[in-house]
């Protein structure tokens, strides 16, 4: 079987298309393709997009990359309104996990939304330690 090498520029275009389409299933399936060199361009995309849905999509792509450059975006997303479904709430859980530098806590938030709400409130009041 031939292994197809990923092209970072093509991946970035694909990521951007997924973000604009807000194709949540495709975003989930593309998460493993996000590499460290994609972090800075995805953070820049977060800054360029105009809706909370698109910002949510960017952060979902970045969720497996615990990287200092994501912290500002993660903190910013905590001010997003809660959506009609749990998508925003779960993305806020991702954001808090990044800010606390503990991705393993996500499972706790899945089962304890009150703790998530409390931790979101704490982080919304806290300045980033940059």
Image: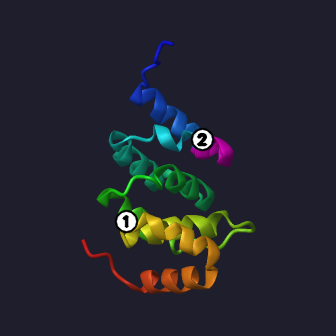
Looking at the rendered image, the quarter that the C terminus falls into is bottom left
Foreground pick, 50 / 85? 85
Counting residues from the start of the chain, the first of labels 1 and 2 encountered is 2
- According to the image, label 2 marks what residue? 29
Quarter location, residue 103:
bottom left
Quarter location, residue 72:
bottom left
Task: Please state the horizontal and vertical placement of residue 95, each as a whole percent of the image.
Answer: 47, 67
Distance between mark 1 and mark 2 Cα atoms: 25 Å
| Crowd tier of the residue under label 2, counting other residues whose Cα lies within 10 Å: few below 14, some 14–19, many 20 or above | few
In the displayed orientation, state which residue is furthest to the front.
1
In the displayed orientation, state which residue is furthest to the left.
130
- According to the image, label 1 marks what residue? 72
Task: Please state the horizontal and vertical placement of residue 96, each as a whole percent of the image.
Answer: 46, 72
- Disc 2 is placed on an element classified as helix
Residue at 44% x, 41% y: name it. 34
What is the chief secondary structure element of the magenta stretch? Answer: helix
- Vertically, is 126 above or below 36? below
């Amino acid at each position: 079987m031939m292994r197809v090498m990923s092209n970072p520029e093509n991946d970035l275009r694909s990521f951007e298309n997924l973000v604009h389409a807000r194709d949540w299933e495709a975003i989930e399936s593309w998460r493993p393709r996000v590499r460290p060199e994609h972090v800075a361009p995805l953070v820049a995309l977060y800054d360029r997009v105009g809706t909370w849905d698109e910002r949510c999509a960017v952060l979902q792509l970045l969720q497996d990359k615990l990287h200092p450059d994501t912290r500002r975006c993660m903190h910013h997303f905590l001010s997003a309104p809660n959506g009609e479904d749990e998508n925003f709430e779960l993305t806020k859980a991702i954001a808090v996990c990044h800010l606390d530098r503990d991705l393993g806590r996500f499972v706790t938030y899945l089962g304890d939304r009150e703790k998530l709400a409390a931790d979101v409130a704490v982080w919304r009041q806290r300045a980033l330690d940059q």
